[in-house]
């Protein structure tokens, strides 16, 4: 029997998708999931004929609400909050179709190479956020790494640290994906902003409890000396002296490659979602380029980073929407499917070259 589209459970309140403070009662979620399982005769996930993996990227409070330190409002200003609601509804309706859900958690510490706290400017003070750091800036002495950090990063050798950050910026510029960008402190481990948005946590628990699914979490972003936009790999893997700086997430790469279908949503479309899909595309092409057809990107469940201009309402100091739109075009050209959460997954079967999410009848 093919999976059904189920109703959204009656306890779900859409207004909570906009509530930073919402925290579900986890015992109540378990009880509701058990009752829902009995009422609808829901099968355990291990019996699925097709293994469908939902990857939710960085759906965390710092990104998902205006109270967060790096809110992904998109051009509408309500982007991530709208996405919270659509993601939750999609997961509830497709409870029987989705075999497992993995949520990534961007996880940071007070001093990291992409935070202003890591750097000192010509005036001896840290720079502000939302600026690039280039190799030319470092060579001109406009910025330097805080030498106090060398005590615990590299055995008290500030010269090693200086060489490393110059090497890092050159590697980023050589790769051509990003230049080093300084973000406000966000998703600090132990902070409120690190947690999943309440309605997302509620929905993932409900799925796990109702279907006996693992409900995995993938941590990323804790390396002091490299960015980690993608859940599959940090931006730079090596040190200037030839040593290993970081490693690819080979175990999770294997999980995604082994799935029959992978559905992807989350924040932000212009950064962590884009980088994760780019890395997945590279891993797929190394195995079998035809496997791109098993990837589905929920375009209406992700938003782009924008930085509103406080002096000009409706204008932005930075707007990464074009980068996200261009990436979606590339993913489509590569054979992936850009779809909408409001469409029945059965309709995705008609996409060119798609085997569909559901098993063949």
Image (cartoon, rainbow, N blue to C red):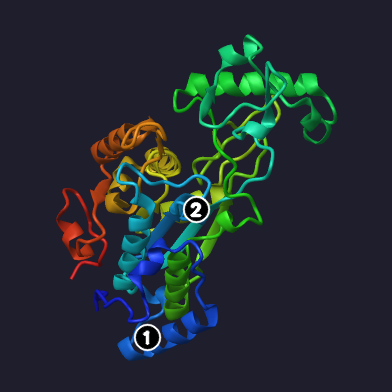
Regarding residue 240, the answer to whether it shows in the image is no
Vertical comparison of 101 with 298: above or below: below
Residue at figure coordinates x 49%, y 68% from the top left: 22
Q: Dividing the image into 4 quarters, which one contains the N terminus? A: bottom left
Residue at figure coordinates x 52%, y 24% from the top left: 132
Residue at figure coordinates x 42%, y 80% from the top left: 210
Residue 190 pos. (x, y %): 66, 57
Vertical comparison of 100 with 279: above or below: below
Left or right: where does residue 292 sit relative to residue 232? left
For label 1, the residue is 36
Q: Earlier in the sequence, mark 1 or mark 2?
A: 1
Residue 199 image-quadrant placement:
bottom left
For label 2, the residue is 67
Residue 59 pos. (x, y %): 46, 55
**Callout 1: helix, strand or loop?**
helix
Residue 348 pos. (x, y %): 20, 58
Disc 1 to disc 2, how far (Cα)?
33 Å
Frontmost of labels 1 and 2 is 2
Residue 310 image-quadrant placement:
top left
Farthest residue, direction front: 311
């Amino acid at each position: 029997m093919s999976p059904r589209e189920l109703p959204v459970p009656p306890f779900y309140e859409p207004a909570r998708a906009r509530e930073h403070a919402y925290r579900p009662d986890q015992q109540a979620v378990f009880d509701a999931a058990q009752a829902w399982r009995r009422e609808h005769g829901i099968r355990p996930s291990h019996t699925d004929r097709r293994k469908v993996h939902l990857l939710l990227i960085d759906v965390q409070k710092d990104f998902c609400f205006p109270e967060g330190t790096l809110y992904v409002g998109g051009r509408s200003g309500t982007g991530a909050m709208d996405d919270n609601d659509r993601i939750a509804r999609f997961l509830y309706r497709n409870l029987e179709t989705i075999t497992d859900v993995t949520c990534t958690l961007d996880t940071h510490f007070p001093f990291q190479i992409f935070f202003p706290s890591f750097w000192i400017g010509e005036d001896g003070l840290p720079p502000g956020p939302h600026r690039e750091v280039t190799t030319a800036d470092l060579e001109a002495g406009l910025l330097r790494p805080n030498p106090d950090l060398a005590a615990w990063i590299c055995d008290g050798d500030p010269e090693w640290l200086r060489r490393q950050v110059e090497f890092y910026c050159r590697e980023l510029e050589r790769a051509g994906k990003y230049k080093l960008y300084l973000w406000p402190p966000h998703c600090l481990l132990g902070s409120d902003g690190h947690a999943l948005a309440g309605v997302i946590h509620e929905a993932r628990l409900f799925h796990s409890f109702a279907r006996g699914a693992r409900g995995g979490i993938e941590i990323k972003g804790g390396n002091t000396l490299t960015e980690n936009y993608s859940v599959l790999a940090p931006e730079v893997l090596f040190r200037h002296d030839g040593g290993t700086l970081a490693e690819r997430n080979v175990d999770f790469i294997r999980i995604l490659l082994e799935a029959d279908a992978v559905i992807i949503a989350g924040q932000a479309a212009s950064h962590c979602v884009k980088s994760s899909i780019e890395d997945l595309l590279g891993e797929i092409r190394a195995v079998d380029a035809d496997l791109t057809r098993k990837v589905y990107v929920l375009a209406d469940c992700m938003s782009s980073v924008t930085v509103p201009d406080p002096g000009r309402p409706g204008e932005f100091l930075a707007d990464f929407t074009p980068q996200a739109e261009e990436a979606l075009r590339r993913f489509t050209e590569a054979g992936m499917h850009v779809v909408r959460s409001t469409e029945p997954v059965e309709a995705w079967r008609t996409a060119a070259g798609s085997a569909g999410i559901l098993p063949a009848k």
